[in-house]
Each structure stands twice: as C-alpha cells, then as structure tokens.
Image: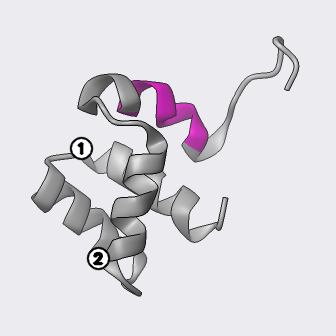
C-alpha cells in the first residue's frame, strides 16, 4: 500500500485496538476463531463481555473476521 493511501473500513481501527488492549490483531482473530460459529452480534458481545472491548472496536474486529480477511 502506498504511503498516501488511507486505510478505511474495519482495519482503520486496528492501530488503536492494538494500542489500547495490548495485543496484535492476530490475537483477536484467534480469539474469534476459537469462539466457534456464532453470529456477528454474538461475537461482538463476547468480545465486549469477556475481554472488555468497546463496541466499535469489537464490531470492527468481527466485521474483519467474518469477511475472511
């Protein structure tokens, strides 16, 4: 990606997620993988309850995960 391209969508949250919670995005993808076949909001709620993520951060991670990125 060129330096002048702006990251958009769920990935735009990744730097702040890593900084705030202290884990790389790969960690959160593994957490979601281990959660099993849940629906979007079930996964969001699991991240919020079990890992104290904010709604926007949890939603961005789940959206990325479910998109298969």
Residue at image coords 41%, 87% = 37
In this rendered view, identify the residue nearer to me: 49 or 56: 49
The disc at residue 54 is 1
Element class at badge 2:
helix
In the image, residue 31 sits, relative to residue 56, either above or below, namely below
Marking on residue 42:
2
Please state the horizontal and vertical placement of residue 64, each as a whole percent of the image.
56, 57
- Give above or below for 59 relative to 57: below
Q: Earlier in the sequence, mark 2 or mark 1?
A: 2
Which residues are the magenta region?
11-17
Where is residue 60? Give x, y as percent.
46, 50
Q: Secondary structure at mark 1?
A: loop
Relative to 8, does residue 5 appear above or below in the rendering?
above
Against 55, is 7 above or below? above
Structural crowding at the residue carrying mark 2, measured as other residues with C-alpha within 10 Å and reported as few (<14), some (14–19) or many (≥20): few
15 part of magenta stretch: yes
């Amino acid at each position: 990606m060129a330096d002048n391209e702006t990251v958009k969508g769920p990935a735009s949250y990744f730097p702040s997620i890593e900084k705030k919670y202290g884990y790389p995005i790969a960690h959160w993808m593994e957490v979601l993988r281990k959660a099993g076949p849940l629906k979007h909001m079930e996964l969001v709620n699991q991240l919020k309850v079990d890992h104290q993520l904010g709604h926007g951060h949890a939603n961005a991670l789940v959206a990325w995960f479910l998109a298969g990125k």
